[in-house]
Amino acid sequence: MTDDVEAMGPISFLIVEFPGSKITGHGLPIFVDLVDQRLIRILDLLFVTRDADGSVRAVELQDLDLDGRLDVAIFEGASSGLLDEGDLADAASAIEPGSSAAIVLFENRWARSFTQALRRGGAEVVAAGYVPLDAVAASLDAAEAADV
């Protein structure tokens, strides 16, 4: 592992779907704040759209909500080159036709010192993941129903 990579925190990705390609900008200020607080570092940000025929294509950064301002100008040029055609295919399977999505690849800087300490001790983070909130809610509902 190179020194630069070893010094990084865990890397995560999100695919955020915008049904009907309606992007309101809600959440963008909080996303920017996470970057400003240095809790995360954006490695790649790619916007995609899935056409009615199911094909997915990359979309240039633009005025997504048509308010006259470039909505994500702060992230323009955020491209490590790590996202590829396979990631577009993953997005295609995750979003509905007629929708758009943002694919975000980011470093969890908040966990950097923790993972570095683990590495110094000979350990390595070998898996990580996210549990969708609807899956958590379903599990909690099932557990509550079993208690009744």
Image: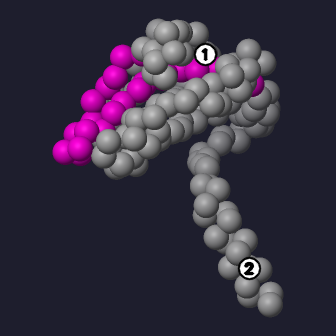
Q: Position of residue 65 (x, y in %)?
A: 49, 23
User: Magenta region, mostly helix, strand or loop?
Assistant: strand
Q: Position of residue 114 (x, y in %)?
A: 79, 33
Magenta span has 54?
A: yes
Q: Where does label 1 land, which residue?
A: 4
Q: Residue at x 74, y 79 (%)?
A: 143
Up-down relation of residue 8 to residue 85 (above or below): above
Instruction: Give the Cα separation between the discs numbered 2 and 1.
Output: 44 Å
Q: Residue furthest bottom?
A: 148
Crowding around mark 1 (Cα neighbors within 10 Å: few <14, some 14 to 19, many 20+) is few
- Confirm whether residue 67 shows in the render: yes
Up-down relation of residue 56 to residue 133 (above or below): above
Q: Is residue 84 left or right of residue 66?
A: left
What span is in magenta? Answer: 38-61
Q: Where does label 2 land, which residue?
A: 143
State which quarter of the image contains the N terminus: top right
Q: Position of residue 20 (x, y in %)?
A: 40, 41
Q: Amino acid at mark 2?
A: Ala
Q: Residue at x 40, y 48 (%)?
A: 94
